[in-house]
Image (cartoon, rainbow, N blue to C red):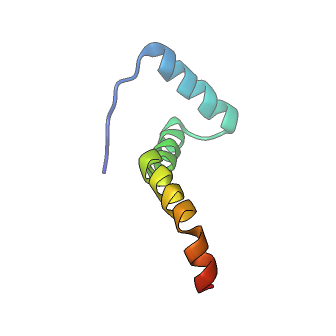
């Protein structure tokens, strides 16, 4: 999929500078940033799973 976005000048400059610093293309850096965002667990899901695990900790211990 190809996506085109328009960034404010300040953000575009930051993106270009960071890509140059890392020695990658702007496109590769943007692709990596999107991949990281999509790979990160949703905060609400993370909080719910931690709550469930904590609540059921004793049960898990007995089943182990």
Residue 52 lies, with reference to residue 20, above or below; the image says below
Query: Hey, which quadrant is residue 61 in on the image?
Result: bottom right
Report x, y in % for residue 43: 47, 46
Report x, y in % for residue 39: 48, 54
Q: Left or right: 60 with respect to 47?
A: right
Q: How many marks?
A: 0
Q: Residue furthest top?
A: 9
Taking depth in this image into account, of 2 and 48 the one nearest to the observer is: 48
Q: At 54% from the left edge and 64% from the top edge, which residue is drawn? A: 53
Report x, y in % for residue 50: 53, 57
Q: At 43% from the left edge and 53% from the top edge, which residue is drawn? A: 45
Residue 36 lies, with reference to residue 19, above or below; the image says below
Query: Hey, which quadrant is residue 19 in on the image?
Result: top right
Q: At 53% from the left edge and 68% from the top edge, which residue is drawn? A: 56
Taking depth in this image into account, of 56 and 7 the one nearest to the observer is: 56
Taking depth in this image into account, of 5 and 54 the one nearest to the observer is: 54
Taking depth in this image into account, of 61 and 43 the one nearest to the observer is: 61
Q: At 50% from the left edge and 14% from the top edge, which residue is drawn? A: 10
Residue 16 lies, with reference to residue 49, above or below; the image says above
Report x, y in % for residue 7: 40, 22
């Amino acid at each position: 999929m190809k996506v085109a976005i328009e960034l404010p000048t300040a953000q575009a400059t930051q993106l270009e500078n960071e890509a140059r610093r890392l020695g990658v293309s702007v496109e590769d850096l943007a692709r990596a940033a999107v991949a990281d965002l999509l790979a990160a667990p949703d905060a609400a899901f993370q909080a719910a799973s931690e709550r469930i695990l904590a609540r059921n900790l004793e049960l898990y211990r007995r089943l182990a």
